[in-house]
Image (cartoon, rainbow, N blue to C red):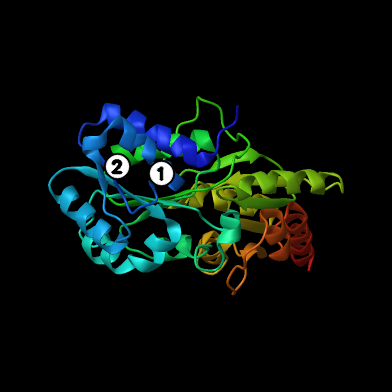
Amino acid sequence: MPKEMRTVFGETLVELGREYPKMLVLDADLHTSSKSVLFKEAFPQRFIQVGIAEQNMFGIAAGLASEGYTPFASTFACFAARRALDQIAISIAYPRLNVKIPGSYVGLPTSRAGASHNCIEDIAVMRAMPHMRVVDPGDNTELRAVMHACMEYDGPVYFRVTRLTLPDLFDESYRFQWGTGALLRPRHDVTLVGTGMMTHLCLRAADLLAGEGIRAEVLHMGSIKPLDTELLVESAGRTGAVVTAENGTIIGGLGSAVAEVLAETVPVPVRRVGVRDRFVESGGIDELFTEHHMQPEDIAAAALEAIRAKAR
């Protein structure tokens, strides 16, 4: 039976805990929501509950990393990207300490939590942080692969955990590599670039476009920083038009990263799908995706606009 991504996150923490005895998990009173509770049950002596004190948690994580441990400091994305940002920047990113930061409850699927918990700016914030690697996995297989890659990389990583059950993008043979995207559907009329859960919506948008005789290429960029610039430039050069889609703000996120690369290499029309310059209200998930023009139909419409701009 398909599992929510947060459940696979908890299960993979346990899997890594068995393999790496110096791995620890820190939590800020959200372990039942994030499912890091599974690690607590398996390794109670290696689970540190700091309570509702996110800034303190990242300070503790920095200290543990400096002593040779590999801490996963788990909290909601909004608390990592906003509340504890100074501690992450100065205590973790600046000295390049080996702390892994899983941000859960990201973007619109946080749904009824409202503006305080609908974190849309975490990609932008973490991408701007020197030394920080940023990942938005597209399915459970990639999440698990990312977490294994985190243990093999000595340095700070921020990765997203979406609170949804997502369709599969990859099979069990998939291996995550930093700075490597995936060409999911080779075509030549327009490039759709997705990250995280939005890649599935890009594939659905490509199906809609196919009904109109438009062959859309689909790229998945799980690794946002570093970004697969080679794959992106090759695709943009082939199609001449690009649309990005992300479960977050378009300001500073994946769309900005793609536009920055293409502006310096292959200047083609780019359209960005995501949250505009506004906060996210409470509401149902489908309702919010419609409100913010992030449905497959919206991605397809952006593709048509980019194609028309290419023609001009």
140 to the left or right of 308: left
Question: At label 2, which amino acid type do we have?
Answer: Tyr
Q: Depth check: 40 or 285 in front?
A: 40
Question: Label 2 belongs to which residue?
Answer: 153
In percent of the image, x 72 and y 55: which residue is there? 295
| Farthest residue, direction left | 67
Number of other residues with Cα within 10 Å of mark 2, as a class: few under 14, some 14 to 19, many 20 or more: few
Q: Depth check: 271 or 41 in front?
A: 41
Q: Height in image: 15 above or below 164?
A: above
Q: Height in image: 30 above or below 147?
A: below
Number of other residues with Cα within 10 Å of mark 1, as a class: few under 14, some 14 to 19, many 20 or more: some
Q: Height in image: 196 above or below 59?
A: above
Question: At label 1, which amino acid type do we have?
Answer: Trp
Quarter of the image where one finds residue 11: top left
Q: Depth check: 296 or 284 in front?
A: 284
168 to the left or right of 303: left
| Quarter of the image that includes the N terminus | top right
| Farthest residue, direction right | 212
In percent of the image, x 41 and y 37: which residue is there? 10
Question: Label 1 belongs to which residue?
Answer: 178
How far across and how far down the image is residue 222, in percent?
A: 50, 46
Distance between the alpha carbons at the discs numbered 2 and 1 = 10 Å
| Farthest residue, direction bottom | 277
How far across and how far down the image is residue 166, in percent?
A: 60, 40
| Quarter of the image that includes the C terminus | bottom right
Q: Can residue 148 be spotted in the picture?
A: no
Q: Are marks 2 and 1 in contact (CB under 8 Å)?
A: yes
How far across and how far down the image is residue 206, in percent?
A: 75, 46
Q: Can residue 215 be spotted in the picture?
A: yes
